[in-house]
Amino acid sequence: MTVNHPSQGSRIVVLNRWSDGLATYHRYIDHAVHNVAYVCTPNGAAALRASRIAHVEQLSDILDEDALHEAVLACHEALGGIDRLIALSEFDLITAARLRNSFNIPGELPDTVVRFRDKAVMKYAVAAAGLRVPRFAALEDLAFPKPGAIDVMRFPIIVKPRNGAASIGVRRVDTRAQFDVLWPTLPLVEYECEEYIDGPVYHVDGFMLNGAFLIARASRYVNTCLQFEQGKPLGSVMLDLGPLNDALLAFAEASLRALALSNGPFHLEIIGGGDGLYFLEVGTRVGRGEIPFLFHDLYGVDLFDLWVAQQSGDEARFAAQAQAAIAASASPARGGFLMLPEPVGKVFVDAQLPQGIPALYGAVFPTRHHFFDGAGGYETTILARFRYRGASEDEIATAIHATLRDFRYTLAEIVTPALPG
C-alpha cells in the first residue's frame, strides 16, 4: 500500500512487531512532516493509528530476514531512499542494525548492537573492564569434543540463549549429569552457560546521554524473570536513596561504559552475590512490562519518545524530552509493579481490584472470556498487571505483598461438548 505525498522531512522506516498500544508511533513521529513507512505483520498494520502513512509492507513472519530485507527495499523505492530506520523491540535490534548496514542508514550498526544482544560477548567486555561476572562460557567453546571445560564451573549453572530475552529458553541445571543429557539437544552456537549466583536480583533502567545517566532508577525484583517464565508472580520495587542504590547505579554506569554505550535506553540486570555485585545482562532498549509506564506516570518521562527521537534524528524533540528527564531525575517518588503470569488453558471470568492499598494506582486485566493460550508475555495478555507509587521502598513492597494476599479472581475451564455416543 503506497500513498504519495510531497517530501517535507526525513524518510523513515519503522519495523513494528506490536499490535497493541505500543504501536502508536504517531505519538512520537510527526507523520505530516516526515514520510513514514512501516514493515509489520497484518495485526501490526491494523494497530497503526497515524492518519498519514507513506507506505506499508506486510509480512506474515517479521523474523524472516530475507523477506524483511525485500520489504525494506520496497520501502526504499517507495520513499525514494531511507534516512532513518526505527526498531523498538529487542528481537529486532540486531536485524535493524544489519539493515542499516545494507542500506547505508545512520544509526546503530551490528558491531555495536552485538555487545548488547549476545550474552557471551557482553560478559567478555564487562569482565575485561574488571567488573564481576559469573563464570561463564559460550557452549560452542566447550565442545572439544565433549563439554569437559564445564568442570571449571560450580553447579548449579544457568543455560540460556545468547540472543534471548525474557528468560525464554533459560534452564537451571543442577548437576553435571543433567548437563550431559541437555548438551546434545542444544544448538551450541546459540547458547551460553554461567554459574548460578545466589542472591537478590536488581535491575537498573534509564537513558544514557553522552556517556552519563540522563535519568536512571535502580530496583530490586520480587522473584525473578525465570520464575515468571515458570509460572510465579514477578514484581519490582524501586530502591530508596542510600548506599545500595548508589552502588547499583555506579556498577551499572561502569558496565555501560565498558560496553561503550554513550547514548540510548538501557535495561541492565545485576545480582547481589555474597562477595559483591555481579553483572547479569543488559539490553539497549526500554525495559519491558510496566517499566515504561512507571517512568511516564511517576516522572512524566516517556522513554520511548526519547528513543524514537534519537533513532529518527529529531534533535529538537530529543532536546525537549531530555530536558524533562533531567528535571525529573531528582524526584523522590518511588514506584513498582507486579505481574501475574497467565494460567494456561483457563478462561478469564472476572477479577476484583484489592481495596485499601493506597500505593496501588493502576491495574490491567484481560477482557472477559479471554482464553489463556500460553502466548502471553510481559506486554501481552497475562492474568494481571499492577502499578504502584509511593514515598518509599517499604511502602511499595508492602503494597505488592498486600496485593498478592488480597487479589481475587475467577477462572473457568474450557468446556468441550461431548461427542454423540
Image (cartoon, rainbow, N blue to C red):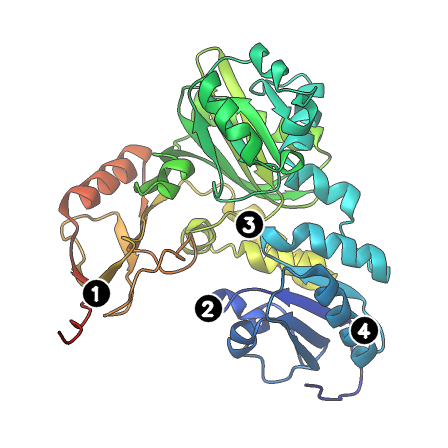
Residue 20 makes an appearance in the image: yes
Q: Secondary structure at mark 3?
A: loop
Q: Nearer the viewer, mark 2 or mark 3?
A: 2
Q: Which residue is mark 1?
A: 414
Within 10 Å of disc 4 (Cα), the crowding (few <14, some 14-19, many 20+) is some
Residue under the image location 61 percent in, 56 percent down: 306
Q: Secondary structure at mark 4?
A: helix
Earlier sequence position, callout 4 versus callout 2:
2
Residue under the image location 45 percent in, 43 percent down: 331
Q: The residue under label 4 is which amino acid type?
A: His
Q: Nearer the viewer, residue 235 or 212?
A: 235
Q: The residue under label 3 is which amino acid type?
A: Val
Q: Which residue is mark 4?
A: 76
Q: Which residue is mark 2?
A: 20
Q: The residue under label 1 is which amino acid type?
A: Ile
Q: CA distance from mark 3 to mark 4?
A: 27 Å
Q: Which residue is mark 3?
A: 286
Q: Are marks 2 and 1 in contact (CB under 8 Å)?
A: no
> If the image is split into quadrants, where does the C terminus sit?
bottom left
Up the image or down, 66 lies above or below 243; here it is: below
Residue found at the very far front of the displayed protein: 421
Earlier sequence position, callout 2 versus callout 1:
2
Residue 404, position in %: x, y?
A: 20, 43
